[in-house]
Amino acid sequence: MTAPALCVLVDSHEGETPQEIKARKEKAFMELKERLDKFSVGDYVEATGVDTRGHTVKRAGKLLAEPKKVSAQRNGTRTAGWRLFVGLDGTDISTRSTWVTLFADQGTIERATEPTGWTNGELRGVPGIRSSNHKVRVLFGGKGGKRSAEPAKPRLAGITYTGDGRYELWDVKTQEVLLNCTLQTRVWWAPAPAPEQELVPETARREVPSSPEESDIQAPVSGAEPSPERRPAAPPARRGLLYEGWLASDGTRAVLHLETGDIIGWLTPDLASFIPAVPR
């Protein structure tokens, strides 16, 4: 039996004093928190509220953390609300594409069924898909639609925003572009299996952030092209973290192109992330 959805609606109160209005808003605010407490971290939900710009947004995914009391933008003013973090399991809650804020008199959240099998639907239905999120992985079974009865042979695919409202679905192993489409395009997709180890296949691909401030880490300034002696003639094959290149042996953490030896980026000091080189 499906649990009832939480839905808060706008109410009208005429003739109230300022003190009564304040008391009513504080009561409604705490009642919203009590209702949110009925949900737990890890629940799969659909939540509708506002983003950091005050625009209405709907998120689907797992609750990644406890609700946070915030002062959010609403109709040009800052208003108290509860920020939820909704997205793919394991997503860092500092990622703004997981944020959705509910107010005491506006917003909804309800438990939803987590996708487990194949879906023939619009690309926009893939959890976590955003123009600023390049880490979404799905099993891709080809174009969908009413005339498509079943998916094709599945391929693990990444999804990257390329600008002008278009997205590329590409093979994680071969980097082959499988489909270029919009959010309205119907495709066959299923949740990707949990990775055995962290790969960085997107390092050799075009990543187009929706705004400059979304990139908090700046790549080191690249100097001249690496000299021939810095390009190993026959380095041992490396996979996993260095899926797209060779690690330089000079201690700079530079990652070199598999064929040309050019620097394509750097590893962070903890060797956990890749910083692409800025094209010259």
Image (cartoon, grey):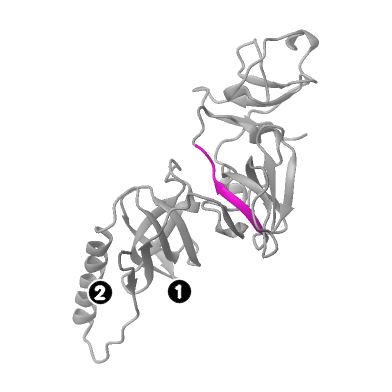
Question: Which quadrant of the figure has residue 134?
Answer: top right
Residue at mark 2? 25
Q: CA distance from mark 2 to mark 1?
A: 17 Å
As helix, strand or loop, the secondary structure at mark 2 comes to helix
Is 256 contained in the magenta span? no
Q: Position of residue 135 (x, y in %)?
A: 57, 42
Q: Quadrant of residue 267?
A: top right
- Given residues 152 and 143, the one toward you in this image is 152
Which percent across, then down, holds residue 91? Answer: 46, 43
Q: Residue at x 74, y 8 (%)?
A: 234
Residue closest to the far front: 149
Q: Quadrant of residue 176?
A: top right
Q: Amino acid at mark 1?
A: Asn
The residue closer to the viewer here, 143 or 122, is 143
What span is colored magenta in the figure?
186-193
Name the residue beneath numbered marker 1.
Answer: 75
SS at mark 1 in the image:
loop
Q: Is residue 103 left or right of residue 188?
A: left
Q: Number of callouts in the render? A: 2
In terms of sequence position, does the residue under pointer 2 or pointer 1 come before the other? 2
Mark 2: give few (<14), some (14-19) or many (20+) Cα within 10 Å.
some
Please state which amino acid type lies under the numbered disc 2: Lys
Is 71 placed above or below 227 here? below
Determine whether, in the image, residue 56 is placed left or right of residue 229.
left
- 187 in the magenta segment: yes
- Residue in the image at 64% along x and 25% along y: 243
* Image quarter hosting the C terminus: top right
**Crowd around label 1: few <14 · some 14–19 · many ≥20 (10 Å):** few
Q: Where the N terminus falls, by quadrant?
A: bottom left
Q: Position of residue 253 (x, y in %)?
A: 60, 18
> Residue at coordinates 38% horizontally, 69% vertically from top-left?
107
